[in-house]
Amino acid sequence: MKIGFIGLGIMGKPMSKNLLKAGYSLTIYSRTEATKDELFSQGARLAESPKEVAEQSDIIITMLPNSPQVKEVVLGEKGVIEGARPGSVLVDMSSIAPLVSKELAEKLAEKGIEMLDAPVSGGEPKAIDGTLSVMAGGKKEVFDRCVDVLKAMASSVVLVGEIGAGNTTKLTNQIVVAINIAAMSEGLILASKAGVNPELVFEAIRGGLAGSTVLEAKTPLVMDRKFDPGFRINLHIKDLNNVLDTSEELGLSLPITSAVREMMNSLAEEGLGDNDHGGLIQYYEKKANVKVER
């Protein structure tokens, strides 16, 4: 099976490497020369456009920042839709608005091209070690064709519904992660301000009901003052914007999500948007005039 991959950033590059390690024939499109050279040296074929990727692929994977970039790559000049054959599959692993996923699927279906929306969770570390979680939307028969490819990049691959359901699930994930990071931050700030060692607080609560993947992944990094991005604040803002746009379309109010987005926006305005989203704690630190550290 021939795979194409478009979008070779923090997440896409290690995902592509895992496809090569699994033995898949891979064609890539990237605007970054160093990335092209690195993947070419590992066996990837190079294409000059998304159209050319699609021409050479049975399954085309996109991993891009947001809805406009996906629409440009798929529907724009020399886009995927111009090169993909009837019966081929676009697997969009980007985190975008569910309505855009549905729009893309409708346009592709007119050309006989199938689609899954299959965003991921886990950040760069899990992209590197191939243990991402994939939440997919689309037809079961299309999912079944692609599931082994997805499992080369992920430890959990779940079909959650029709097109758009994947990104709805991802938005749910991003709400829970953002609010968990905020809760972790508030708790650690309380402990630090009260003069209690945050490392001992972490050890005391991690095995109880407060324990979580977020607590395990982010607390040690915060205490070591490591805010290099596994997942950037700016990207989480983008996801929460999509959450709140979608909630507005559905007539929902999500007040805690709105509050966390505003905290992240405040950090982005201070030039911290490229920090890891665990850096949300810096919002609290500034207000409390205390640092959470070992």
Image (cartoon, grey):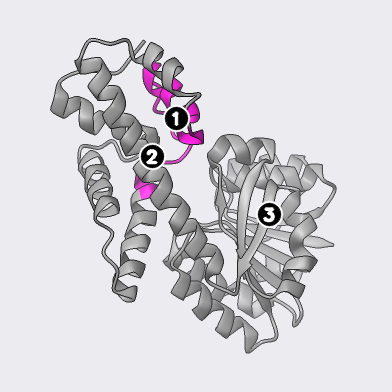
Q: CA distance from mark 1 to mark 2?
A: 8 Å
**Quadrant housing residue 245:** bottom left
Q: Which mark is residue 157?
A: 3
The amino acid type, in three-letter code, at marker 1 is Leu
Question: From this viewpoint, is residue 234 visible?
Answer: yes
The amino acid type, in three-letter code, at marker 3 is Val
> 194 left or right of 277?
left
Q: Residue at x 51, y 57 (%)?
A: 64
In this view, the residue in front, 6 or 262, is: 262
According to the picture, the residue beneath numbered tag 2 turns out to be: 180
Q: CA distance from mark 1 to mark 3?
A: 23 Å
Q: Residue at x 68, y 54 (%)?
A: 157
Provide residue 36's location: percent of width, then percent of height. Answer: 65, 46
Q: Residue at x 53, y 58 (%)?
A: 94
* The residue stretch that appears in magenta: 212-236
Provide residue 234's location: percent of width, then percent of height. Answer: 35, 46
Q: Chief secondary structure of the magenta span?
A: helix
Q: Secondary structure at mark 3?
A: strand
> 289 left or right of 38?
left
Residue 170, above or below 50: above
Give the foreground label among 2 and 3: 2
**Quadrant housing residue 219:** top left
Provide residue 56's location: percent of width, then percent of height. Answer: 77, 67
Task: Classify mark 1: residues with Cα within 10 Å, few (<14), some (14-19) or many (20+).
Answer: some
According to the picture, the residue beneath numbered tag 1 turns out to be: 215
Q: Badges 1 and 2: C-beta atoms under 8 Å apart?
A: yes
